[in-house]
Amino acid sequence: MNENRSLRVALLGAGSVGSQVARLLLERADTYEVRVGARLELVGIGVRNLDAPRDVDLPKDLLTSDIDALVDGSDVVVELMGGIDPARALVLRSLERGVDVVTANKALVAAHGPELRAAASASGAMLLYEAAVGGAIPIIRPLDASLAGDRVMRVMGIVNGTTNYILDKMHREGATLDEALRVATELGYAEADPTADIEGFDAASKATILASLAFHTEVPVASVHREGITGVTAETVAQAEKDDQVIKLLAICERVFADDGSESVNARVYPALVAKDHPLAAVHEAKNAIFIEAEAAGDLMFYGAGAGGVETASAVLGDLVSLSRRRVAGGQALHPGVSAHLPVAPMSAVVTRYQVTIDVKDQPGVMARIAGKFGEHGVSMESLEQRISDEGIATLVVGTHQARESLVQTVLEQLRQHDDVVEVRSFIRAEAV
Ligand SMILES: NC(=O)c1ccc[n+]([C@@H]2O[C@H](COP(=O)([O-])OP(=O)(O)OC[C@H]3O[C@@H](n4cnc5c(N)ncnc54)[C@H](O)[C@@H]3O)[C@@H](O)[C@H]2O)c1
Ligand SMILES: N[C@@H](CCO)C(=O)O
Ligand code: NA
């Protein structure tokens, strides 16, 4: 901070989120000065193309394509470019120089969190990333600070706005995935490459961040089991509707206990069935909702805008005000390292419920033989229903009680080879039914 009590803020990226951060930072400069005790002076906005059309009219003299010079002449960097390169190098260089950083870049934090935190700890700089998970919803700080004295057992919820928007439109309006994705992109919810959303990479990055904070351990993004929503068809949606259920892309992070009492953690992302009367089913459009189960606190629920430029800008600005206050007060930045070294349990060790839809040859005794396959492997069935019978083919829907993933996968493999089976049509986990 200089003698005039101002902090030089460099903004990198002026897309959906960045342009809103710039607008609010300029409009609210006087308010923030009072809140922080120093002026947050936007010294430049790093962009790729000075003349690109933008959602917001930004002062031309603030735009620059010389990002290195901008970063090197700042006290705080707000990284809203997205992607790994050059974001990683810019953030790392800033932290190494003792420059505080705010980012919304979950891909970066998930893949390089330990490296970035180490650089911040070494120089005393601060790294905040509230916007990286749940958009506007405060979720990073509650996990990192408010629940620091508790023992979190499970974190579960909807953490990707784009896929929630798409699935919601498929259920409520019969939209196709492609149509709904186009609108979600226009609304500024999707990633620059929307494959990250629909294939579950974005949610997996968020699951890594949530699990690492919740369990104080390192959960590499590569260890997160990931399934996206491209396999969710109009037929799966219609079947869920018939059963008063909806399909939601869920991220689940939990402690897993083996029979010998040893503890590990698991983080996973997949589309799952949710009962229509469960609160998650009422999460529409690009909203997110995250449930935390903690030993002392019990059940907590966080809900709000999970994506969107201006909504996400709120979380970015919250971080900016917060770290600037600390800078003004002269406080030391704290980046607690990993305090538990828990192994990551593979997907095969997970226990949950399942729904399997199987086309079988419609002949005497077939239901009993299919049921027998589940029983043989210790997978207990909750329901077995014959849905349709047409031209000698019957469609069976099997719902299981809690079962281990490895056992269910073995049953599926054997069913695919079974003489009675024409096709295993779909397989989905039932998480909140
Ligand atoms: N959009 C959301 O709802 C949302 C919510 C939470 C977090 N985020 C995260 O925020 C970040 C920004 O997202 P966005 O939606 O604003 O993206 P965006 O694609 O709308 O904007 C990114 C901007 O950065 C610019 N940029 C990219 N690389 C650059 C480079 N090398 N040099 C200069 N400029 C460069 C792009 O030209 C673009 O204008 C991403 O990390 C994203 O994951 C977005
Ligand atoms: N593309 C992301 C942005 C918010 O992180 C989403 O749809 O959730
Ligand atoms: Na958030």
Image (cartoon, rainbow, N blue to C red):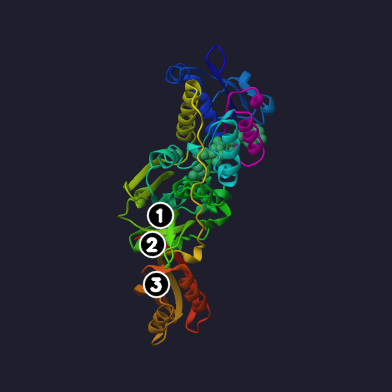
Q: Position of residue 429 (x, y in %)?
A: 43, 63
Q: Is residue 193 above or below residue 4?
A: below
> Range of the magenta residues?
70-98
Q: Residue at x 46, y 58 (%)?
A: 271
Q: Which residue is mark 3?
A: 397
Determine which quarter of the picture holds residue 389.
bottom left
Q: Give the residue type that dot 1 points to.
A: His
Q: Which residue is mark 1?
A: 171
Q: Residue at x 50, y 84 (%)?
A: 419
Residue projecting furthest to the top: 4
Q: Which residue is mark 2?
A: 240
Q: Magenta stretch: residue 90 in it?
A: yes
The quadrant where ligand 3 appears is top left
Using the image as rendered, state which of residue 348 and residue 95 is in the foreground.
Answer: 95
Q: Position of residue 184 (x, y in %)?
A: 50, 44
Q: Give the residue type that dot 2 points to.
A: Ala
Q: Is residue 92 above or below residue 424?
A: above
